[in-house]
Amino acid sequence: MIGNEPIQEAIDLLQELGLQEYEARCFVALNQLSTATAKEIHEISEVPRTRVYDAVRVLESKGLVEVRHSNPQVYRAVSIDEATQTLAKQYTDRIESLKGHLQNTDAQETEGEDHVQEVWSLSGHEAIESRTHELIDEAETEIVFVVVDDALLSEQMFEGLHMAVDRDLSLMLGGKTDTITAQLGTELPTVSVFETGLDWLTGKVSDDEVAISRLLLVDRETLLIGTYYPNADNEKVKEQAVFAKGLENGIVVLLRRLITMGLSAQNDSEY
C-alpha cells in the first residue's frame, strides 16, 4: 500500500480528523476490500497483526467498522458516505466542545477596555479571510469594502455581503479594476458600487513591491487593511494585514477619511 499517493493522502487526512496512524491504515485497507480478516488487513495495511485488533476495535467504537463474529472474525468498513458523515459529526462535536471550553476560559473584560486604542497584525490569507467574514457578519450599521485583489471575490464573500444587504446595512463597495467593479455590480445589483480612485494609494506595483489587497471599514470604527506581493514567488505571496478598532483610533480616523475619499466624493461630508 505504501507508495500509492491517494491512499497516503487519505491516511494523512484521517489522522488530521482524529484517527491514529494504525487506525487510519486499517480503515483505508478495509475500504479497499469488501470484507477482510485481521490477517488480510495486516497484509494490505502493513500494520502489525497484533495491533490490527486494537485498531479495528477503536474503529468499531467510532462507528466506522462492522464486525462479523465468526472464527476468524471478519471486518468491513461502513460506506464512504456513512464514514464521512460520521467523521464530520465527530469533528463538529469536537469543535463545539472546544468552543465551550475556550469560552469558559475567556479573559474577563476590564472596565474601560473599549476605550483602549490598539492595532493588531494578522498573517496568512486564511486567517485574514476569516476575520474579514467575521467583521462583515458582525457589522451593525455600515460596511465600506474596497477590493483590490480579485481573488477575494469568493462565494463566501458574496454570501456575507448579501446577508448584510438583507440586514438593511449601508454598503459602499469599491473595486480597483473594471473587472472587479463589474463583478461586484453583477452580484450585488442593489448596492452602489464605485470605481475607486485608489491609484494614489495603491500605485503601480513592481515585481518585488508590496500591494494592498483589501480595505474594510465596518461601522466607521473597525478597520482591516490587507497587503501582499502580487508578483512575487511563494515565499512572499502570503497575505498580511493590520486590524484596528476604535472611533478615536488615529489609524482608523485617518484611513476612514482616505478610503471614503477614494470611494465617492459625495459622501465625504458624512465622515
Image (cartoon, rainbow, N blue to C red):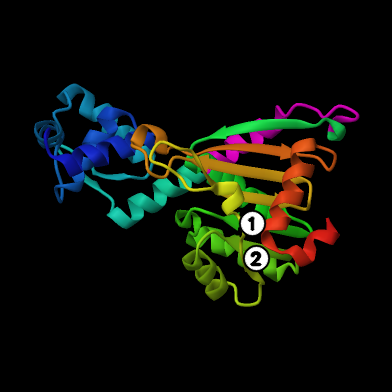
Q: Nearer the viewer, residue 4 or 119?
A: 119
Please give left or right for residue 227 compared with residue 75 in the image.
right
Name the residue beneath numbered marker 2.
163
Residue 141 position (above or below residue 12): below
CA gap between label 2 and label 1 equals 15 Å
Please give left or right for residue 9 compared with residue 101 in the image.
left
Mark 2 Cα-neighbour bin, 10 Å: few <14, some 14–19, many ≥20: few
Name the residue beneath numbered marker 1.
145
**Residue 172 appearing in the image:** yes
How many labels sit on residues? 2
Residue extent of the magenta highlight: 93-113
Amino acid at dot 1: Phe
Q: Find out whether residue 105 is within the magenta segment.
A: yes
- Tag 1's secondary structure? strand
Dot 2 or dot 1, earlier in sequence: 1
Q: Residue 115's image quarter?
A: top right
Task: Identify the residue at the far right of this view.
Answer: 111
Q: Find out whether residue 98 is within the magenta segment.
A: yes
Which quadrant is the C terminus positioned in? bottom right
Q: Nearer the viewer, residue 23 or 231?
A: 231
Mark 1 Cα-neighbour bin, 10 Å: few <14, some 14–19, many ≥20: many
**Residue 74 appearing in the image:** no
Which x, y percent locates residue 15? 34, 33
Which x, y percent locates residue 148? 53, 54
Amino acid at dot 2: Met
- Tag 2's secondary structure? helix
Please give left or right for residue 13 compared with residue 224 in the image.
left
